[in-house]
Structures are given as C-alpha cells and as structure tokens.
Amino acid sequence: MTATSSPVTTATSAAPRTKAAAANPLRRLASEMTRSASGFVGLCLVLAILLISLVGPLIMGTDVPGDPARAWEPPSGEHWLGLEGSGKDTLHLVVIGGRPVLMVGFLAATITTVIAVSIGSLAGYFGGRFDALMLQLTDIVMTVPQIVLLAVVGAFYQLDSPTLLAVIIGVLSWPVLMRSIRAQVLSLKEREFVEAAQLLDVGWVRIVFGEIVPNMASYILINFIIAVTNAIYAMVGLYLLGLAPQRGTNWGIMINDAWTKGAMFNPDAMPYIIAPVTMIVLLQLGLILLTRTLEEILNPRLRDR
Amino acid sequence: MPESASGAAPLIELDGASQVFHVKGKDLPAVSDVSLSVGEGEVLCLVGESGSGKTTTARLAAGLAAPSSGAVRFEGRDLAEMSRAERREYRRAVQYIHQDPYASLNPIRSVRSTLSIPLRRHGLARSGAEVEERVDDLLRTVDLTPPESYREKFPHQLSGGQRQRVSVARGLTLSPRLLIADESTSMLDVSIRVSLLNMLTRLRTEEGVGFIYITHDLALAKYFAWEGRTAVMYLGKIVEVGPTPQVINHPQHPYTRALLDAVPEPDPELARQKKAGGGLLSADIPSLSDLPSGCTFHPRCPLAEDRCSQTVPLLSRAPAAPEQEVACMVVTDPRPAAPAGAAGAGGASP
C-alpha cells in the first residue's frame, strides 16, 4: 500500500497552502502580481497613468485657462512643466489629455480582440466553407489601408468622437490576430482533451470557448495589450499627422500643436513636447511589462514556480 | 459466454466495419472487416501488437471516427443514421478513456472543474453541494483519497498515474453503460492498477456496464476479461476470438500462440528453452500500405502453406475448440491430402 499512501501524504502537506490561498483571493492576487519585479513595475506604471488620467481631470477640471501673454513660460513652482504657446499650463493639459488616448486604446483593442478571437477560433474549429469565407474576409480587410481610410472618413464625417475612431481602428486591425488564433486552434483542436470534451457531449460553444480558447488566454491577453499599444500609436499618429480634427485635448494633439507652432526650435517649449511623449512612452512600457505578470498568472504551469 | 445477451440487441455492435486512412496517396486499411459486439455487463478484450488496429477499432465503437464501410450499431441503431436525441443518448452511454493522460486532460482545468463540467452540463448534479459530492465520490472511486487534496489540483501537479485516474473518473461522470478503455491502466503502479481494475469489474458485475478493454498485456486480459471474451487483432483484422480462458489456454491461431509465447517466462530454465520471437519466422510487421497477399500473417507464420499466400482466411469455428473463431485455414481446414510435407516446405522456403 505504499503506492497509495505516498501521494496522500504529499497531497495533504500541500493542502493547507492551497486552502489558505483560496480563502483570500485578494492576497493571492497580490502575491501573484508581485512575483515578477518588472511586471510589477509595469503594473504600477499603468495604474499610475490610469489614475492620473481618469481621476486627475475630476480634481483639476477639464477647462484649462490660458494667458497668451505668458506663452512658453519655463517651468516654475506654480507651473511645474511651464506654459505652452497660448499660455496654458502644460501639466494640466497632460493630465486631461490622457483619457481619450486610453479610451481609444482599450476600446479599439477590445473590439479587435473580440472579433479576432471569436472568428479565429470558430473558423479554426469548424473549418470548411466558413473558414474559407473568413480567410477571404481577412484578406480584404488587410488590404484596406487604415490611415488612408481614416483620412477619407475624417474628410466626410466629424472624426472628433474618440469612440468612432476606436471603432474604426478596432474593426480594421483584427485580421492578423485572427489568423494566428485560427492557426493555434487548428492545432489545439486535435488535442485529446478536446476529443474528451466531445465525448462528454458538452456542446461546441463550451468546447471552443471553454476548452480551447482558455488555453490561449495568455497569448490573447498579451495580444490585447499589444493591440492597445498599436491603437494608441495609430491614434496619436493620426493626430500628429493632422488627419483628425484638432479639437479637445490629448497627447497626440499636443505633439501636433507643438510641431505646428515651431516648438521644436524653442528651448523653452521643450517640456511641452517631452511631456506627452514621455507619457506615451511610459504607458506603452508599462503595458508591455505588465504582459509578463499576466502571462505568469494565466499560465498554470508558470503559476506554481 | 455465460451472460451473453440473447434476443436483445447488444450494446454496441461493429458489423463488417472498416477504416481506411489515406496517407500520401496510399490507402492504409487500419481496420478491415471487423465484426464484434458487446452486451450489457460483458467485457471484450482487444489484444494485439502496436499498429494492429486496436485503437482504431475502439474509436469506431466510441463514435470518434466513422467507418469507411460497414456499420457501427448502438442497441441495434446505426450510428450514421441516428437522430440528434438518439445520438445524445449514445454519447452519454458510451465513454472512451484515452491512452495518454498527459494529452487528454485540459491543462487549464483543475480536477474539480474537469469532473464537474459534464455533471452540470447533463444535469446530473444541480446544486453546488451536489456537484461537490459527486466529484468527491468519483475521486474516491478511483482511489484519489482524500478527495479534498486533489480537487483543486491542476494536471501538471499530478503524477501520470494520478492523471490517469482523473481521466478514468471523468469517463465515469456520466454513468456510462459501455466504457472503452484504451490501455488506460498502462501508466499505473501495479497495486493501483489492480484496485482500479477491481473497481471497473465491480461496475461491470453490479451495474452491468459493458467494457471494451484494449491492451497489449495478455496478463491484464487474463485478469480483467476472464469471464468475457478476447479478440486478437493482427494488421487490422481479428484473427482469433473466443472466451478469454480458451483463447489464453488453448490458442488456436499461430499468431495468438506467438503472442502468448512472447510473455516473459520468470523461470530461467524454461526461458532458455523458448525460441526467440515466439517461433515466428520474422519479427517485422508488414506495412499496412503494402499488405502481403492472402493471409496477411503468412510471411511470419510457422505453419504457413502455399495456399496461405493466395486465399484470405475468414473467421470460422476451430474444430479443436468449438467456442473459438479463428481466421486460419491451416487450423480450421487442415488438408489431409497435403500433410506435414507441404507445411514444412512452405515454412522453410523463405
């Protein structure tokens, strides 16, 4: 009976730990989050930027008073990042300029990921005519040049709604992820646990979204974050190129504004250019670092190290 | 066959089922013209070398593959013509336990979630407490005790044997009426293997669950299917079938004899007397894509005669053992006209 008793003893010694972890999911999450140092730094960066951009405007107000007489004033105790070309506080603009960027980034990435994962996994799982049709569709969508389409749309409609911008970016950028999801499903669906689920007759919705897709969770989440970064670049790029109307305030508009006002050649205007660029860089860096932690949390094999 | 169902349609029946795979433009007849049936509370053991078509036969019976020709019937109804509701009933009644527990458990699911999904889906347990209770019962059934130390585990935290038992427990979630086990105990420790086999035997005798048990280990066939039947497969065909005690104690087909001869002999004195390869002329299994003519076993057969390379033998009653069916002309239809001389010449020529 040694064979039966040995797994029992090892299992009981491990039991209290799992029980304690299950008892306090918050503590467990906290310990998961701090496992990877760089991932934790990323999480802090992202949370800090989210906090500044979402709570900051509520405290400081969205209206920035400007005094053109004090244009390009260098940083001082009163205005930490100085004033911009029309005498507005640069720090205040940076704080209120984050919300549309974040919103477009996350909304577009959500749209992209949802479309890519659902179409990709269904096409991979069912194959056949649906698969062929969807591959045709990706070919068509991939040939649409995003920037040109946005320029055309911008010419006909008011593109000042970040939501519309997010929808356009999201709807145009799913094919690449869809193809890699489809390729992974093609291999995952041949695994025996999928067959086991088919044997238990749990239904295709459950098999595709309950058995197959969660196996790609870390991959999907990492691609979601990459999609956020891409959407942010696309959006900032549009504003920088002046393809979207320069209304409101966001980091893209700030860079464009600095460019058009010739701030590049004005040493006093440096904070006005560097501040939004820094915010974008920090946000992207934070997101990429965050993917590491997420990968460890979502992959049960890495979780127990 | 003491409890062979008379009159009523058997639980599962393969009727001349064949499965041909097309690989690189070649036809590979993995299973050809296999007929077998298993009734309630019966056990059928499929034995044979690797590549003999055991697993493919089992997959046909489990509905995981459709036969290229022939039919698979569940309680007399053809799987290919089943309605949705019938199919659902069949799916619940027949479960297949995979060979490799490293591949057959979803790495992202804990033991509890693996076992509770089918229970919930089929409404076998409704409330959370009921599900918990059933999961614990199943874990106890497969000797994963105490259940609370296994419920939250993920497959990668379990050993091969523990995974195998989780996989068996999953096969039992729907209380199937026929279990098809594909080498499902090959990864277990001997003591656990016996307790699991005893548990499966209990299911068979007490609840009338039918079994198709695949193994390459004749000792297991002997242990588990002593009251049932054993079918020996070679290159996709059944070469001998009959009640297990007869097949093992009085093998008729030369291939069955060779398999039994290949069982290691613990006594070194006796072991030395044994011929290597169990008296076979060759240890190489012919390729499925290029099968020998006539009886596919004739190039390796110590009894081969000239006619063996010309005519395909069919399963028929062996004169010396009326309960067994054998696909060998030399055994079932010995030629008085051409006695030992012809057999000796046929065997020595290659």
Image (cartoon, coloured by chain):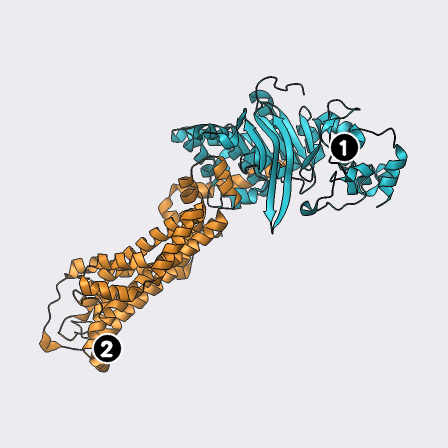
User: In the figure, the cyan chain has which letter?
Assistant: B
Q: Circle 2 sits on which residue? A: A270
- Vertically, is B21 above or below A279? above
| Secondary element at image label 2 | helix
The amino acid at mark 2 is Met
Q: Disc 1 to disc 2, how far (Cα)?
A: 94 Å
Residue B186 in sight here = no
Q: Whole-percent x and y of residue A34?
A: 39, 56
**Front-lying residue, B51 or B30:** B30
Q: Circle 1 sits on which residue? A: B328
Q: Whole-percent x and y of residue A249?
A: 18, 65
Q: Which residue sits furthest top?
A: B7
* Residue at 60% across, 50% down: B25
Left or right of B63 in this view: A163: left
* Residue at 60% across, 44% down: B21
What is the quadrant of the N terminus of chain B in the image? top right
* Residue at 14% across, 61% down: A62
User: In the figure, the orange chain has which letter?
Assistant: A
| Residues at marks 1 and 2 on the same chain | no
Q: Whole-percent x and y of residue B152?
A: 46, 40
